[in-house]
Amino acid sequence: MKQFTFSVLFILLGLSVFGQEKKDDFKITGSPIVTVYTNYHAGLGESNGISGFEITRAYLGYQAQLLPSLSAKIVVDAGVSPAESLMAAQKREVYLKNAQLTWKEQNLTINGGLTGLLQFNVQEKFWGHRYIAQSFQDLYKMGSSADLGVTAEYQFIPQLSADFSFTNGEGYKNINTDNKYRTGLGITIKPIPSLTIRAYGDIFQQSLAEKTNPDTYKTQQTLALFGGYKCKYFSLGAEYNYQKNSAWKDRNNYYGYSVYTTVPINKKWHVFGRYDNIDSDDKDSNKWISFTGDLVIVGVEFSPIKNIKISPNYKFVKDYDTKLLAHNNSNWAYLNVEFTW
């Protein structure tokens, strides 16, 4: 996979250089990438013994336009590791998030390297509050936001586009050495400017070793459906996601939906809300899944300037405890801040 990816990068570079060789006067331009997510949170009710400040994400990098059709980006992600429990201390983790070349010519865009993925990109942009919570597939580990491989997008007409991905499938935190690849295809339709409809599916194959035991290991499959309507008065989005044989284990199937809305009050103030529900086919023995239950987020967002977003919000979590076979409810008050440059 590494040799294939680097071959694609060199091909992209060669195509762009060949296509632009007469434009010797082109000037390389670039800009830094700085994005920071931070918050203060406090538990309410039975969770009132838990509170603290967090920097959940810091993206630091640089992007450059090398040629009219060729750009490059490198980003380092400094985040926190998943905690074993709400009371457990979290450790800082630093990863290379992106190291990619992008070739764009007319309606075709090809990305190669450690590149951002398109699996839930449309949903994440429509939700619009990534600094408060990840979109559904990212939050519940149905896919990664970046991976090593190749993606391609093609805009057939303004109302129709398609995207394809061929990646390691294990995200940007892991190195693939097991001959597994994830292949995905997405279709996005905009019948009218205010309406977006998207369907996505992928197949994540087993390794050669796992294929020798087909009764235990199965090919992982993911399906995502999304519809969103946006006008000047409000936006409303809904998505359904399903993953079959998660982590290549037979009957490790889980699914859920997410509904979210944003209502602008004026240019600086917005009100938003979101509801998630996630479940599995085998609830009473689903220790393989980190979360099943419900998530509710309600809040307001204030953006005094373009580069800063501030949001006081409330979160309600109804988590199904796989050990006690019961639901645990928790309530949280958050103050989230996003800074970008």
Image (cartoon, rainbow, N blue to C red):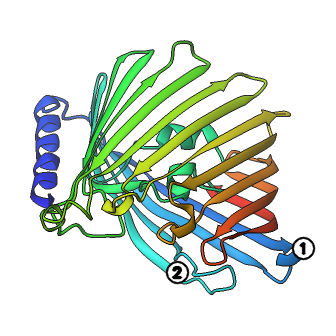
Residue 83, percent across and down? Answer: 58, 79
Q: Does residue 178 sit above or below 33 in this rendering?
A: below
**Which quadrant of the figure has residue 264?**
top right
Badge 1 element: helix
Closer-to-camera residue (241/48) = 241
Numbered badge on residue 20: none
Left of 320 or right of it: where is 315? Answer: right
Numbered badge on residue 92: 2
Between tags 1 and 2, which lies in front? 1
Amino acid type of the residue tagged 1 in the rendering:
Gly
Amino acid type of the residue tagged 2 in the rendering:
Arg
Taking the view exactly as shown, the residue that stands out farthest to the right is 45
Closer-to-camera residue (185/128) = 185
Q: How many marks?
A: 2
Residue 260, percent across and down? Answer: 69, 40
The quarter of the image holding the C terminus is bottom right
Q: Does residue 41 sit above or below 153 in this rendering?
A: below
Residue 151, percent across and down? Answer: 28, 42
Q: Residue at x 62, y 35 (%)?
A: 238
Q: Residue at x 52, y 80 (%)?
A: 92
Residue carrying label 1:
45
Residue 57, percent across and down? Answer: 56, 66
Q: Residue at x 36, y 55 (%)?
A: 245
Q: Earlier in the sequence, mark 1 or mark 2?
A: 1
Badge 2 element: strand
* Alpha-carbon span between mark 1 and mark 2: 29 Å
Any part of residue 116 in sight? yes
Left of 55 or right of it: where is 174? Answer: left
Closer-to-camera residue (20/302) = 302
